[in-house]
């Protein structure tokens, strides 16, 4: 990779060293073109193009893993907490009950918000279908296939809701991160004539 940086630096300064350098520069350019082609190939699933990638996907996964692991540890330590709480006063029992409740409810509340966040959105131009990828309770990728006719934009959007799929599944997409605006307009029905 250092050879590539050196090649770019010399070509920007327009320094011509030898015919060997021209050959070397062509190899660098070919390798850059090859990696760009590989990136474009990896952004497709079958014939589907990636038109949106959620910026918070990695952070959301990390927070969910942390929440699930701390809840698992807390649930495993419940017998110890309950044994100590029964031997202590009412205040300690209240604190143990509150922490037990928070151990169980924090992943549930986090999932309530995060299950709407679209981590990746793909568009198939041939079939005019979309695939939205979200995260499940256990941080697994969940894919939902739908068409633009299945999308409904609510008049009063709810919490983290951009559109509804099948009139029951709310999904959130940050439109500033959409790479293909024409596909996004088709998704929301903005390409249809006004009635």
Image (cartoon, grey):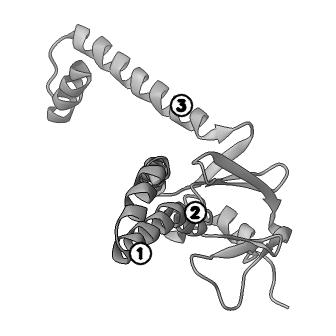
State if disc 3 and disc 1 touch (CB < 8 Å). Answer: no
State if disc 2 and disc 1 touch (CB < 8 Å). Answer: no
Cα separation between marks 1 and 3:
60 Å
- Identify the element where label 2 is drawn: helix
Visible in this render: residue 123? no
Q: What residue is shown at x 46% (from left), y 28% (from top)?
A: 35
Q: Which residue is mark 1?
A: 94
- Identify the element where label 3 is drawn: helix
**Sequence-wise first label, 3 or 2:** 3
Visible in this render: residue 48? yes
Q: Nearer the viewer, residue 74 or 12?
A: 74
Image vertical order of residue 17 relative to residue 137, above or below: above
Q: Which residue is mark 2?
A: 111
**Sequence-wise first label, 1 or 2:** 1
Camera-side mark, 1 or 2: 1
User: What label does residue 37 carry, if any?
Assistant: 3
Q: Position of 61 compared to 85: left or right?
A: right
Q: Position of 2 compared to 51: left or right?
A: left
Q: x, y percentage for residue 143? A: 72, 50
């Amino acid at each position: 990779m250092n050879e590539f940086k050196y090649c770019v630096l010399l070509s920007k300064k327009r320094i011509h060293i030898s015919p060997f350098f021209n050959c070397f520069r062509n190899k660098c350019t070919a390798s850059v073109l090859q990696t760009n082609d590989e990136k474009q190939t990896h952004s497709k699933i079958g014939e589907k193009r990636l038109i949106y990638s959620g910026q918070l996907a990695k952070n959301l996964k990390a927070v969910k893993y942390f929440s699930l692991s701390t809840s698992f540890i807390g649930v495993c330590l419940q017998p110890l907490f309950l044994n100590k709480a029964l031997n202590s006063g009412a205040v300690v029992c209240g604190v143990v009950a509150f922490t037990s409740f928070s151990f169980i409810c924090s992943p549930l509340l986090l999932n309530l918000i995060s299950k709407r966040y679209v981590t990746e959105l793909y568009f198939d131009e041939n079939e005019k279908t979309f695939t939205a990828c979200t995260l499940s309770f256990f941080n697994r990728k969940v894919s939902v296939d739908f068409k633009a006719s299945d999308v409904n934009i609510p008049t009063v959007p709810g919490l983290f809701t951009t559109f509804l799929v099948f009139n029951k599944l709310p999904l959130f997409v940050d439109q500033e991160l959409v790479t293909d605006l024409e596909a996004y307009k088709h998704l929301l029905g903005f390409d249809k004539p006004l009635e």
